[in-house]
Image (tube, helix red, strand yellow):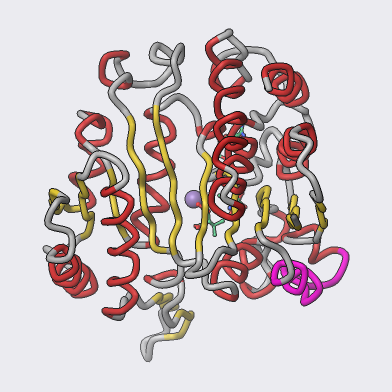
Amino acid sequence: MKIAVFAGDGIGPEVTQEAVRVLEALGLPDLELIAGDVGAAAWRKHGHPLPEATLEIARSVGGILFGAVGDFECDTLERHLRPEQAILGLRKELGLFANLRPARVFAGLEDLTTLRPEVAAAIDLLIVRELNGDVYFGEKGMRMTPDGRRKGYDVMSYAEDEVRRIAHVGFRAAMGRGKKLCSVDKANVLETSQLWRDVVIEVAAEYPQVELSHMYVDNCAMQLVKNPGQFDVIVTGNLFGDILSDQASMCVGSIGLLASASLSEGTLGLYEPIHGSAPDIAGKGIANPMATILSAAMLLRHSFGLEAQAVRIETAVSKALADGIRGGDLGGSAGTREIGDAVLARL
Ligand code: NAD
Ligand code: IPM
Ligand code: MN
């Protein structure tokens, strides 16, 4: 059972360490953890944020546990050398096109979100975010206009097969949950979105039991704080999914709670918290590791079929929260290690 561990930058190593402790505590036979360098850490050591050796490790394992990348000292490097290219490169190179970002309110946290408790209590949704296309991977650049102005550009586009395969993921996810799918786009303005909507409607014919709706992304941002309980599964593009999932995290209390799975057509998957390297709190031992611990649970479920072990981890996290264990992100004082200990004790 080979798992790659790419801890990365900032709080990445701190939160990943706790998730590794949880994985090791399960007593899984044949568990082999293989560390690899990514992000600014890799750039400093090897001159590249995603060294070939790291990619080789990634291709040799069943699942990847990823911390976070990002370092403000690297923000002026040429783009291909920036830490973020590690995660973007892994997603693209490994064909990890389907990003699952579940958000639900944990018992005991209803009063701790920035929404009214009765609004927050109803949240149990899944954002299915496309991860290999959109404005992230279109042609981009910076040029001079003839009249001497700098002009930056990033081309947004989706091909119909790219939309079709993520739509299927969305519909299948809905079939396994509340059978409601909301496709989020900006078809009132963008051609990319019009194609998105047309293709989602075509795919819907194969899933007559799923109730399909469409929503513009600006409205969706509003509805997520007005009445998030209306959503079951949301399927959307790369950029909109990035933004809406950070917003959904605050609806359930903290970005330190939201895990994600990035899946390919095969069994290989990458699992990471949705948050970044959090340079403002890095090195202080105060980051909440729960999102990463919950990502490890998703890893066991999706890449190794270990549903019972995944539920065991999720239950331990839920219990720790129900028992009042709170990091600074939730208004408490428990540090990273203390939260890890609390989850381990409840395993
Ligand atoms: P961020 O998610 O790192 O942090 C946003 C805010 O949330 C910060 O105030 C941070 O302290 C807080 N936060 C995040 N995770 C937390 C946790 N586990 N516990 C407690 N508080 C937490 O986003 P940012 O500040 O916009 O970006 C910082 C860097 O991370 C940038 O370089 C960015 O590119 C990168 N980034 C990387 C990933 C990734 O590796 N997948 C994701 C997002 C951002
Ligand atoms: C995320 C992050 C990444 C993204 C960045 C770091 C490239 O924000 O995983 O949500 O935009 O996808
Ligand atoms: Mn993001």
Q: Tell which quarter ligand 1 is in.
A: top right
On the image, the x and y values in percent for residue 159 come to 30, 80
Q: Quadrant of the N terminus?
A: bottom right
Q: Is residue 3 left or right of residue 155?
A: right
In percent of the image, x 40 and y 44: which residue is there? Answer: 245
The residue most toward the top is: 323
Q: Report if residue 52 lies within the magenta region.
A: yes
Secondary structure mostly seen in the magenta stretch: helix
On the image, the x and y values in percent for residue 293 come to 64, 36
Q: Report if residue 259 lies within the magenta region.
A: no
Image quadrant in which you'd find residue 126? top left
Q: Is residue 124 left or right of residue 320?
A: left
Q: Quadrant of the C terminus?
A: top right
Q: Is residue 305 left or right of residue 176?
A: right
Which is more toward the observer, 254 or 305?
305
In percent of the image, x 79 and y 45: which residue is there? Answer: 29
Image quadrant in which you'd find residue 169? bottom left
Query: Which portion, as a residue range, is magenta?
Result: 45-59
Image quadrant in which you'd find residue 84? bottom right
On the image, the x and y values in percent for residue 205 come to 12, 65
Which is more toward the observer, 149 or 106?
106
Which is more toward the observer, 10 or 293?
293
The relative height of residue 149 versus residue 345 in the rendered view (above or below) is below
In percent of the image, x 31 and y 46: which residue is there? Answer: 176
In percent of the image, x 60 and y 48: which residue is there? Answer: 299
On the image, the x and y values in percent for residue 278 come to 64, 40
Which is more toward the observer, 249 or 284?
249
Q: Is residue 235 left or right of residue 324?
A: left
